[in-house]
Amino acid sequence: MAALARIGGRHLKFVGLINSSASCFFTQRRGVASKLFVGGLSFCTTEQGLSEAFSKCGQVVEAQIVMDRVSDRSKGFGFVTFASVDEAQKALMEFNGQQFNGRVIFVDYAKAKQSFGGGRYPIARGPPDPVEVAATTTETSKND
């Protein structure tokens, strides 16, 4: 699906319908504008239960609860994607600060997923080779 969105975006750029700075188009195209972050979920909340509850506000495209890889248990937050921005806004107004499965949940618009590092952090390559460190130290002391 993401590949189709990229191809569609490239085609529209080529045709000249959008320019490269049309981030609003891609935000709505990829569903970030209609995707909500839901925090404070009970650990017993299921994706189906989350979807059913939020479907009162409109058509839920996807409901996802983030799970811990090790314990295979809910991390207590998730995401709900709606078919339209208006439905997402309605759900945000209706559910933010309300009780759901015995806990107060917090709803906000989801932020775009960011990659770790993003080129700011060097890649860990392990400890330096002792021979290289010795050679570098010797060269530095000769230059002084």
Image: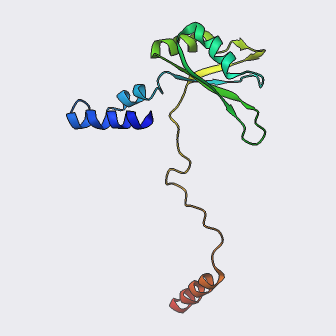
Q: Is residue 19 visible?
A: no
Total residue callouts:
0
Counting from the top left corner in percent of width and height, residue 59 is at: 52, 12
In the image, residue 70 sits, relative to residue 56, either above or below, namely below
**Side of 16 where 62 appears, left or right:** right
Q: Residue furthest top?
A: 56
Q: Residue at x 65, y 20 (%)?
A: 106
Q: Residue furthest bottom?
A: 142
Q: Is residue 12 above or below residue 108?
A: below
- Residue name at image x 66 percent, y 71 percent: 127
| Snapshot colouring | rainbow
Query: Can you give x and y, in whole percent of width and height, for residue 138 in the image?
Result: 58, 89
Residue 8 picture location, percent across and down:
33, 33
Based on the displayed image, in which of its 4 quarters is residue 9 positioned?
top left
Residue plotted at (46% across, 16% down):
85
Q: Splitting the image into 4 quarters, where does residue 47 fall?
A: top right
| Of residues 137 and 86, the one drawn nearer to the viewer in this rendering | 86
Q: Position of residue 103 (x, y in %)?
A: 76, 17
- Residue drawn 32% across the image and 32% down it: 22
Does residue 18 appear to the left or right of 35 in the view shown?
A: left
Q: Is residue 6 visible?
A: yes
Quarter of the image with the N terminus is top left
